[in-house]
Image (cartoon, rainbow, N blue to C red):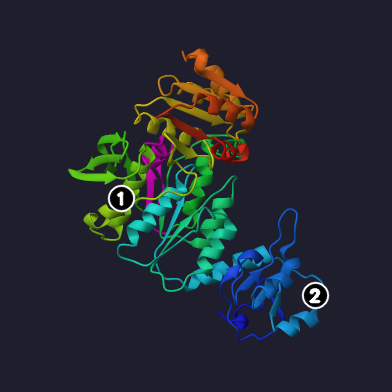
Amino acid sequence: MLIKNILGLNNAQLIYGNELDELNNFSKDTRTMSKNATYLGLEGENYNGSTFYKEAIEKGAKTCILNNIPLDYEFIKNNNCNIIIVDNVLDFLISLAKLKRLEINIPIIAITGSVGKTSTKNIIADTLQVKYKVLKTSGNLNTVIGLCLTLLSITDEEVIVLEMGMNKKGEISLLTSIARPTIGVITNIGTAHIGNLGSRENILKAKLELLEGLNGPLIINNDNDLLHNWSKTANYKGQVITYGIDTPSNYTAKNIKYNTLGSSFTIENEQINLNILGKHFIYNALVALAIADLFNIDHKLIYPVFNNLTLEEHRTNIIKRHDYTIIDDTYNASYDSVYYDLEILKSFSDRKIVVLGDILELGNYGPEIHRNIGKLIPNTCDILITVGDLSQYINEEALKNGFNKANSYHFKTNIEAIKCLNNLITTDDVILLKASHGLNFLEILNNI
């Protein structure tokens, strides 16, 4: 993409430099700048990235795209850097990504849902890589900036797999208008961000904004009540492909078995083995099988993928420490993800300690959802520790439903929980750590 081809976009003006230079290696972070990269001076709540243009140039940037700010032209000339001024850097980035999308004529898969987006994205990308060169969203960069940067980073890939996150109405609409996906996946409709959206029904509407830009099949979790009901009356022009465990679907997992080494299931007499525990990973495998069929990939080619799955850091990672086991799921939390983690615990026969913190962004639904989690606790663990404010409702409800009070603890701070755990942990214990990111359960993980 040459500079001359984007001039005028969002009133872009080249105020210094060569319009025949290329724009590539886009970055919004001076700390990760590479030689001849393009720096995007994006604004945050408490900073204006455009003011860091000198640092970006010193670290190798060839082109800087900035808001209209005072500039040191002597410095710019001495470093022979291209300076492009736009009305708004984020709006320009969106327009640039849309322009890039017009040049892309390959399949684009978009994944959204309340939980499971990242792991689903990863298994889809790994499945496709047995036959194609794949570009995927890095980490959990599932916002508009991450999506745009992913599209702009394409080189010779043959398929793109994008993760789409949201916490309010209209965000998926924007993302799908940029990406224009050819295949869509909705993993589930849960309670994440319900405080912003008001109800699960509104979350469904927000996730279904994906359809506004989708031109191709939609793959949905048929076990999810709202998605199941929607699919029965859906007025979507494309194909709807369903997957499930409890509900008969296009892809249905049967004969599910768990052990400490992983999971297994059958689908139409085909035996599938996974090296990772958990019902949600069986859902992921079903999506991968559906994708394999859409791309005419022999299932046998992806068996090694299923046997070598890896997890993002702090997302249901099994850690062997000293003579006990930690299930590290400290990245974030929702009702659904807590439920899945408690299901994983059932695979362990040793003493189980569950440490749960507050789930945030639930608004007025906070007490109710935490109480619903409390109802899951009896018969799933031996010791319950809760941390925070809302998590006290987990504790209260667990006791109401028969959990042993002598094995129940509630603390306001991580430090108190750490002291308790270090006194309680014995040989062969299995400890689950789970809370919203804002609770900083990494502090507990690193100190027990």
The quadrant where residue 277 appears: top left
Q: Nearer the viewer, residue 47 or 30?
A: 30
Q: Is residue 131 above or below residue 188?
A: below
* Residue identified by numbered label 2: 71
Quarter that holds the C terminus: top right
Left or right: residue 203 versus residue 411 is left
Where residue 264 sits: x, y (%)?
26, 40
Q: Is residue 130 in view?
A: yes
Bin the neighbour count of mark 1 within 10 Å (Cα to Cα): few under 14, some 14-19, many 20 and up: many
Nearest the camera: 339 or 251?
A: 339
38 displayed left or right of 130: right
As helix, strand or loop, the secondary structure at mark 2 comes to: loop
The range drawn in magenta is 215-238
Q: Quadrant of the N terminus?
A: bottom right
Residue 263 counted in the magenta span: no
The residue lying at 60 percent from left, 34 percent from top is 362
Front label number (2 vs 1) = 1
- Kindly report the distance in space between the C-alpha atoms of the residues bearing marks 2 and 1: 53 Å
Tell me if 130 is positioned left or right of 170 in this view: left
Amino acid type for the residue under numbered disc 2: Leu
Residue 250 position in % (x across, y down): 28, 44
Return the residue at label 1.
Answer: 306
For residue 290, say whether it is visible: no
Under circle 1, the secondary element is: helix
